[in-house]
Amino acid sequence: MGRGTMKKILFFDIVLLAGLLLSVGRVNAAPAVPESGTDQACLRCHAQTTTWKQWTHSAHYKAGLTCTMCHKGADKPDHKAADVSKPACTDCHYYWKDKAAEFKDSIHAKKGLNCTSCHNPHADTAMAPANPRQFAKRCTRCHKGNVLKLHAFMPHADMHLSQQSCFVCHSDVHTVLSKKDNTVTCSSCHPGKTLVKKVLPRHKAFFPRIALHMRKLNCEDCHRPKGPIKTCSSCHSEKSILARAQQNKNGWITDEPVLQKYGYMVGTNHVKWLDIIGILMFAGALAVWVFHGGLRILAAMMRKGGKR
Amino acid sequence: MSHKRVYLHPLTERIWHWIHALAVVMLAITGVQLHWPGSIHWFGSLKTAMSIHEFFGATLVLDFLLWLFYNLFSGRIKHYIPTMFDLTKGAVIQAKFYGLGIFQGKPHPFAPTEDNKFNPLQKTSYFGLMAFLVPLLLASGILYMFPVRFAGIIKAIGGMTVLGLAHTAIAFIVVAFVTVHLYLTTTGHTLFEEIMTMITGWKETEED
């Protein structure tokens, strides 16, 4: 290889490297500038802001909105912050114009929240993000706690949390009136026998009278959001309301499986005089051992003595 | 005086007897815990005692049926049927023996034979036990185990309280019977002769 050839290769390498560096620089520099005259003008000052960087991924940007469509007064080159208007979301989102009263009554509105407390008009890629868990982060800004841990009571907690938004189960955040107005059951989404069929094999293993329980109970009756899963004795015990109700209705005859299986009711079989008679009978039987046996031994000893 | 061996208890009867014995003892011990669950915890929880009690209860039901059908079809039930003599004169003779003769070293008044293996008091008590007490005890136990299925019957006889009291009362009698029964096994020539007979089936008898 000659000296000239080496120089040529080296020169080529430098050009290539410089090209690469330049192209990387271009990627890092700024998002592609939109073909909008107005926004081109905004970029002169606002290009380095986080808002601008997120903006080009947003649903609003993709829908064709430009800065000045919402921010009136921003088209003046030397505007001050005060000159620029902040639009009302309901100018375009008419639905919430109609529902404004409902939102105002909601606990969230009363706590001082508005649209932009949760929705970022410059960044959101959709009204509700594709990834519900991402969305849940907005709730947990205020509702502190480990979401997964809080939902540990739920079967397939991870699946539910990654596939569903919070308000699929917890009432609509826009209209929820209070903490109490916040109930949902498994059967709201899994009605009737669809869920039962799936959970049946697992429950069958330990549940007596499975069909009856599945018909009468909701999942939440045992799988509680707070605290451990209820056990049989939470409902069925000597002192339970159920047991007492059955007792009053039928005497001691009950169709409750646990009571049926463990039907020996302490106290029903206790009649003091019967216990005394029983104990006396057993004592009498033991007395046969002691006295009759003792006499036999004594008599045998006397007989032996007599023979001698 | 010569010795004669008689075969009193065929294998089926011996197997029946010892299963019966084990089941009755287990039922009695677990029954004590079930009756006084507040102060007696021999088998841990009430549930455990209940499960053991139910298991041996079912065992006893099957064992009772084995006894019943075996004795009915083989004709050996005749051993258990007391005659008028057994119920009157024979019982008195046997009772006199236990009350007096046994202390004087007199021989048993009724030597067992292959055709007649029980003395009059045995016949009477075993008959009463196997024809009345054990069936009643088992029946009340079965009703107790399935109070819903047999709700009608239980109501008819006066409810769970009557059922429970009947079961308990009969159980007390059976426990007392077993205790005396065990004592009477010691009245052979030696202390363990009768028990050995129940194990081997053979008994040595004296012939004058």
Image (cartoon, coloured by chain):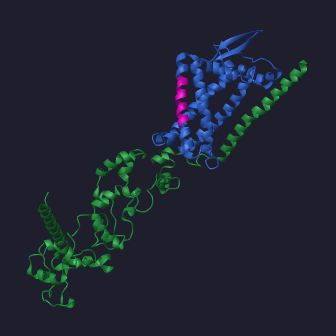
Q: Position of residue A22 (x, y in %)?
A: 16, 71
* Residue B57 shown in magenta: yes
Does residue B16 appear left or right of residue A64 in this picture? Answer: right
Q: Position of residue B101 (x, y in %)?
A: 80, 21
Q: Position of residue A179 (x, y in %)?
A: 36, 71
Question: Color used for chain A?
Answer: green
State the residue at coordinates (12%, 87%).
A75
**Quarter of the figure that contains the C terminus of chain A:** top right
State the residue at coordinates (29%, 64%).
A133
Q: Position of residue A84 (x, y in %)?
A: 18, 87
Q: Does residue B183 appear in the picture of this structure?
A: yes
Q: Quadrant of residue B6?
A: top right
In this picture, is A19 found above or below A252? below
Does residue A72 appear left or right of residue B175 in this picture? Answer: left
Does residue B153 appear left or right of residue A151 in this picture? Answer: right
In this picture, is B20 found above or below A248? above
Q: Among all residues in the image, which is located at the extreme front?
A: A2
State the residue at coordinates (49%, 44%).
A261
In this picture, is B147 found above or below B73? below
Q: Main secondary structure of the magenta part?
A: helix
**Quarter of the figure that contains the N terminus of chain A:** bottom left
Q: Quadrant of residue A180?
A: bottom left
In this picture, is B101 found above or below B3? below
Of residue A264 and residue A139, the one placed in the foreground of this image is A139
- Magenta residues? B55-68
Q: Quadrant of residue B120?
A: top right
Q: Please tell me how many numbered marks the rendered image carries.
A: 0
State the residue at coordinates (75%, 17%).
B109
Of residue A40 and residue A165, the one placed in the foreground of this image is A40
Does residue B149 appear left or right of residue A193 in this picture? Answer: right
Question: Color used for chain B?
Answer: blue
